[in-house]
Every structure is written in structure tokens, then in C-alpha cells.
Amino acid sequence: MYNSIYNEKDLKYVTNPFKQDDGFPATAQDYNIIKPYVDQLLGEETKRPFNFNVARTSEIAASEMQEKAKQMLMDYIQATIASKLGPEEAARYEQALATGEVTPPEQIAKYLEKDYKDVAETTAFHSLQYLKRKLNVTHEFYKGWKDALIAGEEIYYVGIINGEPYVERVNPMYFDYEQALDLEFIHEASWCRRKMIMSATEIYDRFYDKMTERQLNELLELIEDKPGAGIEPELRKTNMDYNSVKMHKMNSFTDNPFDSDHITVYHCCWKSFKKIGFVSILDDETGQVEEFQVDESYKATGLEESIEWQWVIEVWEGYRIGKELYIGIQPIEYQHVSSDNPNSQKLPYTGIVYNNTNSRPRSLVSMMKPLQYMYIVVWYRLELALARDKGKVAVMDIT
């Protein structure tokens, strides 16, 4: 609908109500009234500022901030006391206040609240600035917002590709996930599946760190033995009428948008369970009990004060290339672990599902579809009336 392509069968009751082969002397043309509104919202998105900040929220960060405040207050107190010793010390004190070497308490509070950054926060902020430009994150968000307006779903992949952080927009047509009731954020689902149509070179370039030489040879054999694998990508069943979209010629060499050398690749992610233990051991030097975390392979030594076993959630992923080649089936390399709740694991695919309360997702375009059809029908009726009009006809008595 956004690209002025609609299903002609939906208007057969208007254009050919009597099911005649000849039809009427008019054609239903798509006069697009949806695209201007969507483009306006896309333009508004490009004007929004993309500002972000980095802040540590752990107990260690809070204690470091308190130590910084304590040190700045001690410096201020010592400088204030020293200024009372003589004129030279008083002049040095005033100069320190002017240069910011010594800060009064009210400015210390303001500095710690707004401007204070430790080394970790500064490093993370500059790293995100670098990745924002390298991965063109602003443009990826623009494409995701367009998906939200047209498809009602905004999906991104946030993970590690070949050892580097990676972010990309995901096409909602080839993405499926747990259809839980009132699910708003996709990373909270228990599983998801993405379908990709890739060439052999694209597959190896993206997954070479997960593939062995034997698997690469199997991939090349798959290209030779099964040409055309994945040229008909299965579309997810949603309220969006994807199946009625006509595929048009993309170049002068082929009518199929997916070349015969391309292969279907599935990326599946799911939440599993992992057994961990919390071991308490008495430290002989300090006389205090220390607790640390172990995996299920830990063997008790008899020196433990206590061992408490628990099951926590762990996110796994795996790839299937073609129908038989499986790679990268393992726990996700960097788990989204929360310090407050070890079970708050998140999928590497994130995004939002819009307008799905007690219904399937509804986008702006799907809500405007009846208005677009009505507009097409009105102009079709007008064109039909013009085609039937004979102009002014003189009426005379032939007798």
C-alpha cells in the first residue's frame, strides 16, 4: 500500500461485480494518500535529536562517587583552613577557587550530579559514539521507524558478529517470535527466529568465525548440489497481506528477486536453563565468609561452609544453513545479565510491537487501508462515469 501496490482481488466486487471477462471501460488506479503521511512522520524522525548518556548504576560505582565527593570536600576544607594562616595562603586559596582546583560544597554537589564521569563511563560513551558512526545507527533507526509505521513492528539485531559489536534493522516479513499475549518488547519473548537469504560469500563473511573448513566445504557443496535453495522465502502469517504483493522485475537478467545462488539461513534464539552454584568458604586470613559463583561442573572439596544450587535462564543461539548444515549452536557470547536478577535474560533481537493489546499488531498503514481503498473506489466510479458520459444529446420528434 505504501508503494502504491494493492491487491486487485480486494476490489473485484467493485470493478467486476458480474464476473464478466470484458469488464467495464475503466481501471482502478491507486491514487496514494498513505505515503505523504508516512513520509511526513519519517521526516519528523530525522529531526529528532539523538542524544544519549552513559551511567554506572552498581554499588561499586556509587561508593566510588562517594569517595570522590569525600576527597573534594577534604581538599576544600584543608584549603580553607590553610587560607587563614597568612596573606600568601589566602591569595593562593582565592586563585585555587578561581581555577577550579578547589571547589565549594554547593558546586561539588552540582558537579557530581551533572558533570561527573568516571573512566568507565567516559570510555563507554566514546565507544558508543564511535559505533554510532561506524554502524550508521541513525539510519538503521530510521528504517526501523519506517517498519513501525508500515508493518506495526520495529525489530533490531544487537549482538556480536565476528568479534565486533553489531546493530542492524531486521525485516519484519522474515522474522517470527513467541506470540505471547500483550507482548510489547521482543527481547522479552522466550524464542525468536529470523530468516535470511544470503549468498555463499555473504554467509562466510558473516559467520567465518563460527565455521570450520569442513563446514565451508559443505557450504560450497550445497551451492553446487542444490541450486536455488531458498529462492522462495516463506512469509510469516500475520495480519499484513504479504502474500498478495506482486514481485516485479528488479533487473534485466532475472524475474526472481532472489538469485539461484542464494541460500536460506535461519538464526534461532531461545531461552534455556543453566545450573549454577553459590559456594561459601571461610577465608582463613580475614576470618570472613566469602561467596562466589560456580558452574555445574564444580566438585565439592569439603572446605565449603555451604553450597546452594539454583537454575537460571541462559540464552542460546544457532544457525541452520540450507536444510542440513548447522553452525554456532552455543550460549550467546555476551549474556544480558542483570546484577539485580540473574534470570532477567534478554534475546539478542530487540524491538517493539505496536497496537497489539488484545489483537494482532496494527500499523498506521493497516489502519489507513480502508480509507485508501475507498479513495480508489471513488476515483474509479468517477472515471467510469466519465467513460459513460455521452455529452449533450438533442432530443427531437422524428415523426
Image (tube, rainbow, N blue to C red):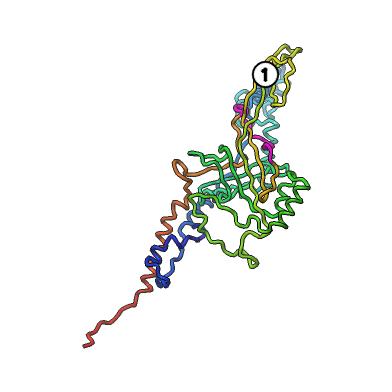
Q: Where is residue 148 in the image (x, y as percent from the top left)?
A: 52, 48
Q: Position of residue 127 (x, y in %)?
A: 69, 40
Q: Is residue 238 above or below residue 62?
A: below
User: Would you say residue 317 sits in the magenta stretch?
Assistant: no
20 displayed left or right of 132: left
Identify the magenta region: 329-342
Say which quadrant the C terminus sits in.
bottom left
Secondary element at tag 1: strand
Q: Is residue 142 visible?
A: no
Q: Where is residue 221 in the image (x, y as percent from the top left)?
A: 74, 54
Name the residue: 38% across, 73% down: 387
19 displayed left or right of 155: left
The image quadrant of residue 296 is top right
The image quadrant of residue 20 is bottom left
**10 Å crowding of disc 1: few (<14), some (14-19), many (20+):** some
Q: Nearer the viewer, residue 63 or 26?
A: 26
Q: Is residue 29 above or below residue 288?
A: below
